[in-house]
Amino acid sequence: MSMRKMTYGEAVKEAMAEEMRRDPTVFLMGEDVGKAGTVFKVLLGLHDEFGDDRVIDTPIAEAGLVGLGVGAALTGSRPIVDIMFGDFIALAMDQIVNQAAKLRYMSGGQAIVPITIRSTMGAGRSSAAQHSQSLHAWLAHIPGLKVAIPSTPADAKGLFKTAVRDDNPVVIYEDKMMYALKGMVPTEEDYTIPFGQADIKREGDDITLIATSSMVHVALEAADILAEQGISAEVVDPRTLVPLDRETLIESVVKTTRAVIIDEGYKSFGITGEIASIVYNSAFDYIDAPIVRLGAMDVPVPFSKPLEDATIPTPEDVVKAVQDMKIR
Amino acid sequence: MSLPSEILIKMYRAMLRIRRFEEQIWEVYTGGLMHGLAHLYIGEEAVAVGVCAALRDDDFITSTHRGHGHCVAKGGNLEAMMAEVMGRVTGHCRGKGGSMHIADMSVGILGANGIVGGGFGIATGAALSAQKRGTDQVAVCFFGDGASNQGIFFEVMNFAAIWKLPVIYVCENNHYGEYTPTGNVTAGKSIADRSLPFGIPSTTVDGSDAIAVYEATAKAVERARKGDGATLIECDTYRYRGHHVGDPGEGYRTKEEIESWMAKDPIQQLRTKILDNNIASGAELDAEEREVEKEMENALEAAKAAPYPDVAEVNQHVYA
């Protein structure tokens, strides 16, 4: 497989460009996606290639924007809708939850709604409480939606291309702190990653670290520290929350007998609770220590740097959780 | 009266079909054959019929919770509609949608919607899709006076205006948002005025007059197909019955008010015009009525005889 080194942001852009070249019914719309290439600048150049017709700046009107995307998807187009900050999805919830997610079911299978909603997640940019949340659990809760949260440039490209080709509404969250992250990315046109396949980012025997999005890198850093202490950690990245690859998560914990689950969503009522329950139910007899869940602190994300940093799980938090299990 | 006679007869028949369907729903509901909610369209027939008579099969509509009339007018099948409201597997949506969610993608019915204003985004997006795909299809969004106060109405009018989208917003102003008089909760002189700041032309028509509705729609369709953009049509109309079966529709509305609207009944109005202009005889129109009656009976019998969906279908169609 031929590979090229690129950033996470470049991988997203490449996925989008390839899909737009492949399929004339794909177009992108969102706030500042045109010449500006989004506020994060990750799509710079896309407008030059595809022009106003297919890379479309929109009003700041998230409900209408997603609503138009749903209607276009119902009638033969494959829109990609860009919601600048994941927090702003709150403004479009009726369109996503009551319309996009329901139309296929309510129509008894007549309709398809091939819309891709891309948005961002993650704290760490001193952007305070309305531009920093990781709200992917909201949408993972709704039957009819698929949710992808890639953690590497290669995953971002492969999952994005799958999202655009999927006949269902897909919400794909990019952690805005990872746009500059570099990695090797396959360059084949038909490189896609099937949804529902977790990826073992690092193999290990003593403990399973189940981590999503940017928390995969927190887990990998923790695994390095643990290795120095003689503890072999396996890092498993679900990559998509819906569908969720339960088998790979369960098999890993059956093998290692312990688990820490790390996700940047609020800790309460979120992804880590769901995954912990799945693992407990299927691997209970194999588990040697209570599963530890690490998530964003249950507070609005604060502005001031020391306060903000205190709300997000760190490699040290992961290491401490593992040390408390007294494996060695 | 410049409309071709076949359009007039077609509209007359379509209004009869809606009226009979809704009367039948009343009986089915009160007879315990149907569950949930049923919002009847009786009295508003001229709006759905006048609009849809000006559309092609491949044009799109979005409908509302009070949507049976739109679906009949756009080409929904009476048997599949009756089966759907009765939760049977032969329904348009295999019994998964029910009265408030009837859809028939094969004739451009993108779905009735249980969210007030739920069709705004979908219809405007269907118009965007038509524009992007280079077709000359048009999308119609039916909505009520109540939905005109939802914020997304103003968002989509802005989108439609900046991109000249082929969409027609048809407001059915029946003067009550559920049980609340529209005037008590709606600012401004008219709903039609609301598109003017966006540069979207609007018109107000007598929603009991199918011909007037047809003509206003035909003009809007022509404008949309030419690429000149959206239109808002406010139809002044009235529902004879309550908000839903189970609401007698009285108390918050006077008897005089209800009777004044029934006196200009849309079906009677069109019948009189057809007769006065010698387009068809009374006997011919009566024959139409008998045919509709027969069609309705067959639809009801077929729906009653149809099975409920197998429980194994419950988790089908969540994903494609």
Image (tube, helix red, strand yellow):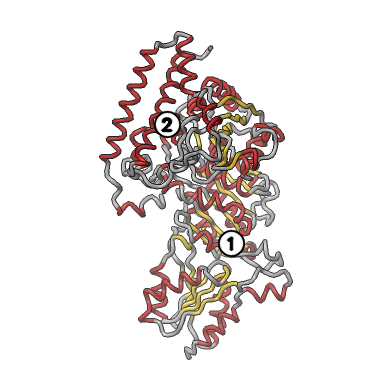
Determine which of the numbered discs, if any, sits on residue A5 in the image.
1
Chain under numbered label 1: A
Q: Secondary structure at mark 1?
A: strand
Residue A87 point in image, percent of width and height: 63, 59
**Is B40 situated above or below A11?**
above
Identify the chain of the residue marked 2, using the numbered disc in the image.
Answer: B
Mark nearest the camera among 2 and 1 is 2
Q: CA distance from mark 2 to mark 1?
A: 57 Å
For residue B84, say whether it is visible.
no
Amino acid found under the numbered disc labelled 1: Lys
| Whole-percent x, y for residue B181 in the image | 60, 39
Which residue is at a point 35% across and 53% down the rendered structure image? B314
Please give the name of the residue rendered at 37% of the width and 77% of the height, measured from the top-left corner. Answer: A283
Q: Which residue is mark 2?
A: B72
Q: In front here: B237 or B131?
A: B237
Furthest toward the right, the residue is A304
Q: Amino acid at mark 2?
A: Val
